Amino acid sequence: MPGDTTHLMLLRAPILTAPHAFTTRAGGVSVGEFRGLNLDDRQDDPRAVATNRERLAESLGFGADSFARLTQVHGTQVVTVTDSGVWEGDALVTGAPGLLLAIGTADCYPLLLQDEAAGVIGAAHAGWKGTLGRIAQATVQAMTALGAEPSRIRAAVGPGICSERYGVSAELAGQFRGAGLGEFVLDRPGQPHLDLAGANRAVLLDAGLSPANIWLSGRCSTESDFYSYRRDAGVTGRMWAVIGLTAGSGASA
């Protein structure tokens, strides 16, 4: 199958040691509105998406059948997994090697987390609902149940819609203020805007992470390198944020 691009362009977080990536739209075989490395098959050609997923897995040293992923519902449910497959929720955690946890986004924020000493990883999908519901904190708690310690956990917040592009209703801004996240509501002429990256960082700090152990990509999903639901009026692809444990990794390794 001919491809638009040749090489994957994957973003890495310097604080994570586990195999991981935040994908861009470069390096895939999808065409048209989904041009590039689209990883969602709900609207695109499933054959193209399967090729894209295989390329991503291989780039990290995993097989295409290694993905543990979600039917995301913009909630706060965290699923603990020990095998590949598809679950419903908005975050995944595991201590099992050989898996790639995958989160799909196209403006919402992906979070990747790791406690290297415990051999525990997590991945979360944080749109405004998940951020407001403190899904980052719930993910840390689920990792702790597997033996992780918040003081050791490192978290990377990948590309998502930046505050400059994310105007919201006064009602939603009020919900963030009421939830103790009012400092991330930015007053702008015409309508308030939300800083979801900053809000998720604050939630991670509240969960016990050290400031030095939180990394923000600083990239906005409305840039041309990415898929953006808001920019493209709902007809667009999806990036994946993925993190895995290789065989032999973990607390006993």
Image (cartoon, rainbow, N blue to C red):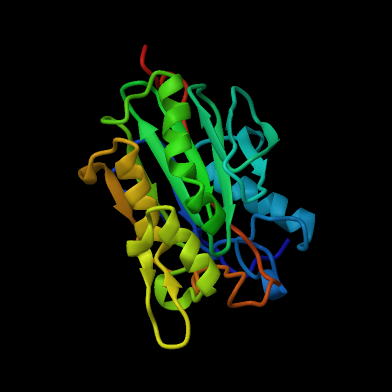
> Which sits in the foreground, 131 or 21?
131
Q: Residue furthest top?
A: 252
In the rendered image, which quarter contains the C terminus? top left
The picture places residue 10, in percent across and down from the top left corner, at: 45, 56
Residue 9 visible in image: no
Q: Residue furthest left?
A: 212
Residue visible at 62% across and 37% down?
67
The picture places residue 113, in percent across and down from the top left corner, at: 40, 38
The picture places residue 70, in percent across and down from the top left corner, at: 65, 42
Q: Say which quarter of the image contains residue 153.
A: top left
| Image-based side of 34 in relation to 209, left or right | right
Residue 239 visible in image: yes
Residue visible at 37% across and 11% down?
252
In the rendered image, which quarter contains the N terminus? bottom right
In the rendered view, tell whether residue 18 sits above or below residue 234.
above
Residue visible at 45% across and 60% down?
176
| Image-based side of 226 in relation to 157, left or right | right
Q: Say which quarter of the image contains residue 3.
A: bottom right
Q: Residue furthest bottom?
A: 189
How many labels, in total?
Answer: 0
| Image-based side of 116 in relation to 239, left or right | left
Residue visible at 54% across and 74% down?
169
> Which sits in the foreground, 97 or 192?
192
The picture places residue 32, in percent across and down from the top left corner, at: 71, 75
